[in-house]
Image (cartoon, rainbow, N blue to C red):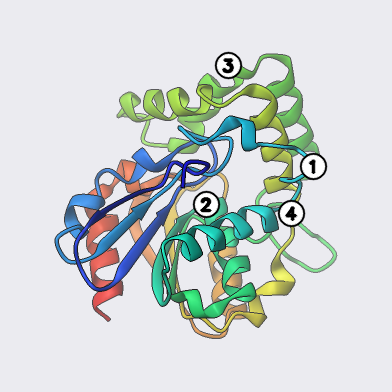
Amino acid sequence: MQRNNVHVLGRGRETVIFAHGFGSDQTAWRHQVPAFESSYQIVLFDHVGAGQSDMAAYSPLRYRSLYSYAEDLLELCAALKLSDVILVGHSVSGMVSLLAALIDPSRFRQLVFVGASPRYLNEPETGYIGGFEQADLDGLYAAMSANYYAWASGFAPIAMGNPERPELAIEFAKTLSAIRPDIAQAVARVIFQSDHRAELPKLTVPVVILQSNNDVAVPPQVGQYMAAHIPQSKLIQINAQGHLPHLSAPDVVTQTLKECLAA
């Protein structure tokens, strides 16, 4: 509970876990929580290395793959005696929750992916479009290594989109900059070099995939690929821009989540 800075709030017989993506923390869900806490028990947490998590718990050896984050998630569920929960996972938390559901599907009733991807690299030989070439990622790692804080300031507006609302990019840059640079660089490599496409067909838990427009990290082909390869899945295109729609278009995301949970 301390390791992941877990907070439990709200009331209701059903539980919703909100899991943040790379570069942010549990505060990213502040727009959604008020809409659900009167009807659901809400669980918020920070992945190790982010937010107010226990930094002493981070080890590049332990967190060398997304499976370790999935193990953390399952330990959180066990500590709170949770089963049959709804998990809303942004970005990397989509695949983290998928891996956790493969290990122990009894913990989850439904998964909702917001801007998630099983593979970020393009694969010309198979026709898979992930959005990045290896040279793109190598350049990203080099920029993070050269001057992490300058990189964060430059990356935030690209990821956020919505250039007419610079305050959104400033907020994302702030949470990015709050991460220890060595941890951010290591985690970025784990995320962007991962490939969990083979796990998609094995999932038995129903999934809703929310795809926003002009997401620099997750092109529309990724959402279509997941919908085609996850057995019980539904792809929903939402009227939002950028990689963090729960911040840039909170009302759209909240309403879509309400409809998904009601269904």
Callout 1 secondary element: loop
**Quadrant in which the C terminus appears:** bottom left
Q: Which of these two is toward me, 88 or 108?
A: 108
Q: Which of these two is toward me, 168 or 188?
A: 188
Q: Where residue 228 appears, x then y in whole percent?
A: 59, 79
**Number of numbered discs on residues:** 4
Q: Residue at x 79, y 59 (%)?
A: 123
State which tag comes first along the sequence, 1 or 3.
1
Under mark 1, the amino acid is Leu
State which tag comes first along the sequence, 1 or 4.
1
Residue 219: assigned label: none
Residue 256 figure quarter: bottom left
Find disc 1 in the rendering and name its residue.
61
Find disc 4 in the rendering and name its residue.
194
- How far apart are the two marked residues, 3 and 2, measured between alpha carbons? 21 Å
Q: Nearer the viewer, mark 1 or mark 4?
A: 1
- How far apart are the two marked residues, 1 and 4, measured between alpha carbons? 16 Å
Furthest-left residue in this view: 38
Under mark 4, the amino acid is Ser
The crowding category of the residue bearing disc 4, from other C-alpha atoms within 10 Å (few below 14, some 14 to 19, many at least 20), is: some
- How far apart are the two marked residues, 2 and 1, measured between alpha carbons? 22 Å
221 above or below 63?
below
Find disc 2 in the rendering and name its residue.
91
Residue 149: assigned label: 3
165 above or below 223?
above
Q: Residue at x 65, y 81 (%)?
A: 201
Q: Nearer the viewer, mark 1 or mark 3?
A: 1
State which tag comes first along the sequence, 2 or 4.
2
Callout 3 secondary element: helix
Callout 2 secondary element: loop
Are discs 2 and 4 less than 8 Å apart at CB?
no
